[in-house]
Image: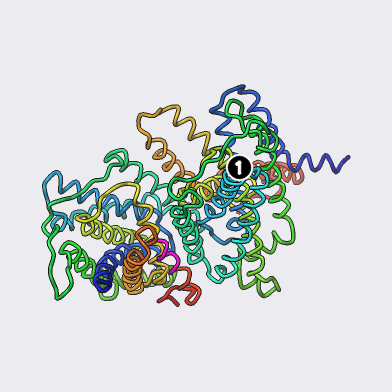
């Protein structure tokens, strides 16, 4: 009983978030706009969690997660469009391809360190973008469509344009799975190895960790999660083209994670919520008159947040909690030792 | 025909080199990836375009002006954004410049719209020099010669002047440089300004044969990243050689495989080269 209570207490924040994600879509009724935003939030937060594994925990900056995201999307779209494969199987195929690719490429790539590695990940995504933009099998420049099958709602992820709720909850369920995976990884042996590698490659090596292996594991897991995100994305959009591999897409994952708090499992979801809430409210405010102004304001906000607190929104949150705890401890100390200054004969 | 392609590649390469020199300066000295580098280039191009359309100034003549404008933009960027994130981790600093790039790109789109802008009727436009069997476009040649001159100028500045040596010292060891009485804050500001001046000048040189649109600046940033990494971070001569290499590879890739592959070939080359030299061709 105590144990359950502890689990509840430790994960209070996560449970509150989960409750919000369950209640809000119902509370807003048939507001498709809000539902769309929540789906976006969940998909990008999911890929952000994946990105967080390799960059936040293992410390290897990736600017190319769009590669795995895009592969996940294309796998579902191509298999569904050409062979009538259900998206669930398509997503599985996407995971397999993305993980294999992550293994093959990064086994070599991890010889590079720091910025050199970051640029290499970017290069991989850009190469894929070119390949997919000329490859006629996957629709080359026109992209590829995914068709809606109303006859089999369960297998087809129950996508219905008039009612997005089932899809939203499926996305939520997958996100929760990813979140639990990442949270348990954070405190696992592997998670500690990753952090050791992040802090110092040499020290990690000297205590018997093989950085090469653990970085590849992180990348493979990360790629798998990104592929799931991509599979959901294409289900939602029902269309994908080679733009999905571009740097701008990769940067969204970086953006939401760093905004929320890098190296923190709550980071991606918080960052994603803030990003898309702002996006929606600014689009409401400025309408379609000047399309760029919301991005300008977002850029400025991003600079301010980053300058003010490098650990992101979660950093600000942690600071507040810590300050309160410190104040509490101080107050307790004061009770223990009596009021300060009384017995210490404060004259110097 | 092939040698013609290579010559064109070399000429583009020189311009790439100048853009990359700008990036490698800030990267080497401050260890910060300036994501807004492509946007600096974009604004340099719009500056040249503005001067051309308002005062019908030829971009070559207005080069000092656009270089100076982007120098100011660089210094401004340093004091407003970069200075505050210097102590944070590399990724944070990067995101700050990414935020800035969003602002600059969308501001450009708002002011100049997403339509392509062209600077036409420049001094060297559509004239060619015939050298044996080769045809060399004068505007390309002017850009190449100008870029090379400016790159060498930056190199001389870094190696010969007092400020330049201070920049070098700061890039080697920040705290030791401070102990030697170097005002690193000032040095960083100058470096960022210099970086801006390089792209501003490159923009003025490119503008006669490059259509301007806000959408293209990400590609410029990415290309500059690759060139800088190929040359080794902070290595100016490395950036020059890597720029030439990328220019030639791009031209050859475009010739043999078609234009849609020309950038993919560069990225592939990067991946292969880095397997052999994990710290860039000229890094150590």
Identify the magenta region: B263-269
What is the chain letter for disc 1? A
Task: Please state if B275 lies on the left or on the right of B77 as rendered.
Answer: right
- Judging depth in this view, the residue of B273 and A145 nearest the camera is A145
Q: Secondary structure at mark 1?
A: helix
User: From this viewpoint, is residue A49 visible?
Assistant: yes
Quarter of the image for residue A30 reads: top right
Quarter holding residue A191? bottom right
Residue on which the image places disc 1: A232
User: Can you say which quadrant of the picture contains the N terminus of chain B?
Assistant: bottom left
The magenta stretch spans residue B48 = no
The percent position of residue A134, horizontal first and vertical second, equals: 43, 54
Residue drawn at the location 57% of the way across and 37% of the way down: A147
Q: Tag 1: Cα neighbours inside 10 Å, few (<14), some, or many (≥20)?
A: many
Task: Give x and y (percent) for residue B219.
Answer: 37, 55
Q: Residue furthest right?
A: A1
Does the magenta segment cover residue B266?
yes
- Residue B61: x %, y % from top left: 13, 57
Residue at 72% x, 43% y: name it: A334
Picture layout, residue A327 above or below residue A348 = above
Residue B227 vs B68, above or below: the answer is below
Where's the C terminus of chain B, which quadrant?
bottom left
Q: Residue furthest front?
A: A83
What is the chief secondary structure element of the magenta stretch? Answer: helix
Is residue B136 rendered to the left or right of residue B157? Answer: left
Residue depicted at x 61% and y 73%: A202
Q: Can residue B154 be seen in this snapshot? A: no
User: Percent position (x, y) of residue A97?
Assistant: 62, 57
């Amino acid at each position: 009983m105590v144990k359950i209570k502890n689990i509840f207490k430790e994960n209070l924040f996560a449970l509150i978030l989960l409750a919000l994600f369950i209640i809000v879509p119902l509370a807003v009724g048939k507001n498709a706009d809000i539902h769309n935003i929540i789906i976006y939030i969940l998909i990008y937060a999911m890929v952000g969690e994946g990105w967080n594994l390799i960059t936040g925990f293992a410390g290897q900056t990736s600017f190319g997660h769009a590669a795995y995201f895009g592969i996940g999307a294309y796998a579902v779209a191509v298999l569904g469009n050409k062979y009538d494969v259900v998206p669930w199987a398509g997503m599985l195929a996407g995971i397999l391809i993305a993980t294999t690719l992550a293994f093959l490429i990064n086994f070599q790539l991890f010889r590079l360190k720091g910025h050199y590695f970051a640029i290499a990940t970017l290069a991989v995504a850009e190469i894929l973008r070119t390949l997919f933009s000329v490859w006629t099998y996957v629709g080359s420049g026109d992209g590829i469509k995914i068709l809606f099958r109303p006859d089999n709602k369960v297998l087809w992820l129950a996508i219905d344009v008039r009612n997005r709720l089932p899809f939203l909850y499926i996305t939520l369920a997958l996100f929760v799975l990813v979140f639990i995976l990442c949270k348990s990884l954070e405190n696992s042996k592997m998670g500690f190895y990753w952090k050791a590698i992040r802090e110092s490659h040499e020290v990690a090596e000297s205590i018997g960790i093989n950085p090469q292996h653990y970085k590849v594991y992180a990348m493979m897991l990360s790629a798998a999660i990104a592929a799931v995100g991509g599979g959901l994305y294409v289900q939602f959009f029902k269309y994908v083209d080679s733009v999905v591999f571009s740097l701008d897409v990769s940067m969204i994952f970086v953006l939401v994670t760093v905004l929320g708090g890098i190296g923190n499992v709550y980071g991606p979801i918080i960052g994603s919520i803030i990003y898309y809430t702002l996006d929606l409210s600014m689009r409401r405010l400025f309408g379609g008159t000047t399309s760029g102004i919301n991005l300008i304001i977002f850029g400025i906000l991003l600079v301010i947040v980053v300058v003010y607190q490098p650990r992101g929104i979660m950093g600000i949150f942690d600071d507040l909690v810590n300050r309160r705890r410190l104040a509490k401890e101080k107050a307790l100390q004061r009770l223990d030792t009596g009021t300060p200054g009384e017995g210490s004969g404060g004259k110097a | 025909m092939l040698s013609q392609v290579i010559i064109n590649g070399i000429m583009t390469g020189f311009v790439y080199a100048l853009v990359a020199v700008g990036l490698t300066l800030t990267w080497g000295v401050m260890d910060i990836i300036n994501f807004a580098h492509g946007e600096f280039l974009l604004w340099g191009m719009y500056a040249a375009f503005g001067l051309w359309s308002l005062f019908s100034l030829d971009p070559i003549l207005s080069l000092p002006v656009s270089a100076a404008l982007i120098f100011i933009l660089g210094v401004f960027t340093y004091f407003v954004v970069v200075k505050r994130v210097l102590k944070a981790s590399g990724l944070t600093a990067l995101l700050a410049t990414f935020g800035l790039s969003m602002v600059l790109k969308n501001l450009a789109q708002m002011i100049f719209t997403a339509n392509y802008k062209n600077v036409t009727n420049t001094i060297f436009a559509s004239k060619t020099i015939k050298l044996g069997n080769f045809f060399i476009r004068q505007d390309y040649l002017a850009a190449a010669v100008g870029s090379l001159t400016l790159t060498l100028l930056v190199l001389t500045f870094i190696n010969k002047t007092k400020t330049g040596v201070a920049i070098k010292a700061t890039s080697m060891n920040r705290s030791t440089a401070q102990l030697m009485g170097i005002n690193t804050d000032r040095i960083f500001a100058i470096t960022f300004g210099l970086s801006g001046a390089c792209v501003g000048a490159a923009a003025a040189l490119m503008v006669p044969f490059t259509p301007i649109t806000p959408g293209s600046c990400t590609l410029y940033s990415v290309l500059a990243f690759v060139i800088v990494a190929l040359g080794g971070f902070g290595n100016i001569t490395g950036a020059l050689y890597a720029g030439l290499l990328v220019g030639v590879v791009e031209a050859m890739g475009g010739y043999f495989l078609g234009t849609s592959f020309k950038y993919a070939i560069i990225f592939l080359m990067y991946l292969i080269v880095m397997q052999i030299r994990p710290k860039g061709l000229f890094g150590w």
